[in-house]
Amino acid sequence: MVYPIVVYGDPILRKRAKELKKDSIDLPAFVQDMYETMYAAHGIGLAAPQIGKSIRVFVVDGTTLEEEKEDMSGFKKAFINPEILDEAGNVWPFEEGCLSIPNIREQVSRPAKVKIRYYDELWNKKEEEYDGIKARIIQHEYDHLDGKLFIDYLSPLKKRMLKGKLTDISKGDVDTEYRISAPLKK
Ligand code: NI
């Protein structure tokens, strides 16, 4: 099932999402819905709050990235109750976008490496390290679970410049190829 994507201005995107309790939902089905929704919107990452569910789950699929120099094979995963254990390495800038903030892309600086512990959709506990674009996707999606968005990292000036566009997005006044749920849409 493809959900509409909740966009900027909806308070759910600003809440700290709750830990998922084992067996509280049909997890494989939910993860499947998240993948379907992400693919329908041509995203490479999607967090549960973006489909209106305030739980600590996100999915990624970097294997669809074209012209990527990094090896993305196998980087299709669901992260349940993730915990970032460590971030390290040089802080580097990379242009980020977000399905909840359509048509805006900005440079964001984050540490290059991340160590993460999580459960997969079959509730196997994992601990892994990532760097480069993979780390970046994980950091961005993880932020969603803590109510953070990539625009929070921008300078006050940049934020002021984006204000009008963000207001338009929250009113649903934005072109997307996917279905959105805008909080201020009349
Ligand atoms: Ni995002």
Image (spheres, rainbow, N blue to C red):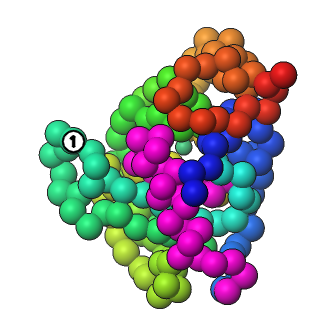
Q: Nearer the viewer, residue 26 or 149?
A: 26
Determine whether 114 is above or below 85 in the image: above
Residue 83 horizontal/vertical position (percent): 56, 71
| Quadrant holding the C terminus | top right
Above-or-below relation of 43 to 49: above
Tell me: residue 133, above or below residue 149: below
The residue shown at (58%, 24%) is: 155
Q: Is residue 97 left or right of residue 90?
A: right
Name the secondary structure under disc 1: loop
Relative to 56, 140 lies left or right: left
**Residue 75 is drawn in which quadrant?**
bottom left
- Residue behind label 1 places its C-beta within 8 angstroms of ligand 1: no
Choose top left, top right, bottom left or bottom right for residue 182: top right
Indicate yes or no whether the magenta region holds residue 48: yes
Please indicate, yes or no, whether residue 16 appears anywhere in the rendered image: yes
On the image, the x and y values in percent for residue 177 come to 49, 29
Q: Position of residue 29 (x, y in %)?
A: 56, 72
Q: Is residue 46 magenta?
A: yes
Q: Quadrant of the N terminus?
A: bottom right
Above or below: residue 122 compared with residue 5: below
How many numbered discs, if any?
A: 1
Give the residue number, with chain letter if any, for mark 1: 66
Quadrant of ligand 1 in image: top right
Foreground pick, 117 / 34: 34
State which region is magenta.
23-49
